[in-house]
Amino acid sequence: MRPVLVLVRKELLQRIRGKGFWIGAILFPVLVVGMSVLPALFMRLSAGKEHRIAVVDLTGRLTEASSLLGAGGQYRFQIYRCDSTELPRLREDLLGQIRRNQLEGVVVVPAGAIGGPATPMELYAKNISSFERNEAVRARISSGVIELRLLQKGLDPQTVLSLMHPLPLRTFKVQKAGAEERSGGVEFLVVYLMVLSLYMTIILYGTSVLRAVIEDKSSRAVEIILSLVRPGQLMAGKILGVGSAGLLQYFLWVVILLAVFVLGGDWMQAKLGQEFRVTVSPGTIAAFVVFFVLGYLLYSTLWAALGAMVNNEAEAQSLQYPLVMLLVVPFMAMFHTINAPHSTVSVVLSLIPFFAPILMFVRIAIDPPSLVQIASSIVLMILALWASIWVVGRIFRVGILMIGKRATLPEVVRWLRYG
């Protein structure tokens, strides 16, 4: 045990003495605060700017829709009535105004929009990637068209407007202790940032283990170290040492973020609204630590094996893609899990040991599953970790001393058989 502790201390000190460790410890909280605050601040800054949208009305009736006239948020609509014969010339003229930055966009409303079958509108703009602008324009014109459809049925305009008045939505998270009002956007952002940090740090510290093994192997220092400790102890020392640096960095992030949100919470709420309130339950924090530790140990053992199989980082680069893909798949599946945390797909994927560090954590943070599922996920990860250590230990024991030749798959099989 003592040799392992000595190696853990060596790896830990080697990392926390480097500038990269402290730069990462400071930059990540800056990134989190920036991603939490800046989008809302920029939205508020842009809220005062007026955007001109030209609406080409082939129905000839959109000026009757009161919901399309007057002020409507940051978008001001200017309606042009025309028929299909005038459309090409008018559209070309308006597109010229877009090119000269005199218009934000042009929307063409088809002739059958009010009484005919559903036909899509057309939006022309320099930037068609603004989902917020696209949705605002679609919703407001659709509202005007629906108003005209109801008026066509003989309903009173005031009655139509009162019936169409949208209701604001407040969101309350239901928990065992009761219901608490929270912002759905802020909660999504918190979970997304925590998952992003899990994803990034597992890759970052996993590849650190890979580099540490390659450095020792290429410098022949491993031959001296192995005269003092066993290969398994060397692997354990590197994994635990690098992992300790990761946990220390997480601790620093938590302290810095707590200080920022506690000391600057009132300022953020004053600038961003009362709904901006970051809340993370103790259970979510505990799950974050558990799944980081298990996920890191599981993946870093594989990266340690990869380091023992190659001679330099160039050889390792192509071989580590399958490992990275094992993390990319659950990261992409995270969005489905957030929408449906208890679907069959989410349950099955979150029980797979290599996907559990991300997907089971997301389920716990969004809407905790049963304790049986959480416990099953942890047990399966521990079993997968035990199997990985057994397999990787055999590869590591032989591969760490194989210098000058890249291991092939048949050779790795032989190492497993005789290691």
Image (spheres, grey):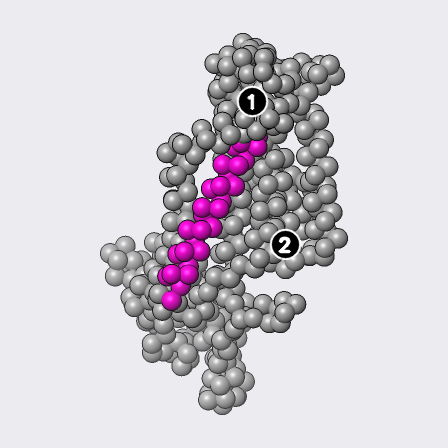
In this image, 402 relative to 95: left or right?
A: right
Percent coordinates x, y for residue 265 in the rendering: 40, 63
Up-down relation of residue 140 to residue 346 (above or below): below
Q: Earlier in the sequence, mark 1 or mark 2?
A: 1
Disc 1 and disc 2: Cα gap in Å?
Answer: 33 Å
Secondary structure, magenta segment, majority class: helix
Please give the name of the residue rendered at 52% of the width and 50% of the height, measured from the top-left corner.
194
Residue 7 in sight from this viewpoint: yes
Q: Which residues are magenta?
A: 238-266
Residue under pointer 1? 307
In which quadrant will I find the C terminus?
top right
Q: Amino acid at mark 2?
A: Arg
Q: Quadrant of the N terminus?
A: top right
Q: Type of residue at label 1?
A: Gly
Q: Residue furthest top?
A: 404
Report if residue 322 is visible in the image.
no
| Camera-nearest residue between 305 and 133 | 305
Location of residue 167 in the rendering, given as x and y in whole percent from the top left corner: 50, 78
